[in-house]
Amino acid sequence: MGLRRIGIVEIQVHDWPAAVKWYTEVLGLRAELLEDDDQYGWLGLPEGDARIALYGEGRVRNPKLRSRCLPSVEVENIAETVRDLEGRGVEVLDGPTVSDEGYTDAHIADLEGNLIELYELAKL
């Protein structure tokens, strides 16, 4: 089968400049490609090849809808990460919560209310 891996998760945003600033300055993602005229960009994480892509109003098919995807980002120390993000003003919706399946997760919201899951795998 030709499926290989997830390379990009796209999130639609209504305020393109504010979203790019939030994802790069608050979350610390690196801008790999930013096309301000088209309101589209790729943001890289510190490890791995997956990217979060933001696309703005001009590319949004239905501007009344928020994104319905849920990027899940692995972190090294979830308690420390949540404390750091709270200190930066990020809205933590829940967690950290320990699951029966061997991970701990928390959910945050970006500046437009789009969900992002953070998770830490159990240490063996």
Image (spheres, rainbow, N blue to C red):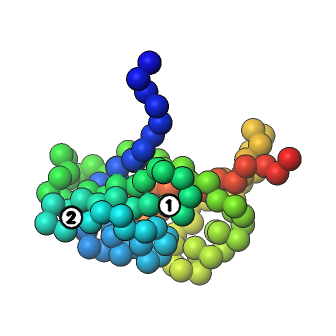
Residue position marked by numbered label 1 in the rendering? 45
Q: Residue at x 44, y 77 (%)?
A: 25
Q: Quadrant of residue 82?
A: bottom right
98 vs 124, nearest the viewer: 124
Residue position marked by numbered label 2 in the rendering? 35
Q: Residue at x 72, y 64 (%)?
A: 77
Q: Residue at x 66, y 74 (%)?
A: 83
26 over 106 or under it: above or below: below
Residue 16, x across and y down, in percent: 25, 67
Q: Is residue 95 left or right of residue 33?
A: right
CA distance separating discs 2 and 1: 18 Å
102 over 18 or under it: above or below: above
Q: Quadrant of residue 36?
A: bottom left
5 over 52 or under it: above or below: above
Q: Is residue 9 left or right of residue 89?
A: left
Q: Is residue 103 left or right of residue 17?
A: right
Q: Residue at x 44, y 18 (%)?
A: 1
Q: Is residue 69 left or right of residue 87?
A: left
Residue 35, x across and y down, in percent: 21, 64
Q: Residues within 10 Å of mark 1 (few under 14, many from 20)?
A: some
Residue type at the position of mark 2: Glu
Q: Which of the two discs, 2 and 1, labels the residue nearer the N terminus? A: 2
Q: Residues within 10 Å of mark 2 (few under 14, many from 20)?
A: few
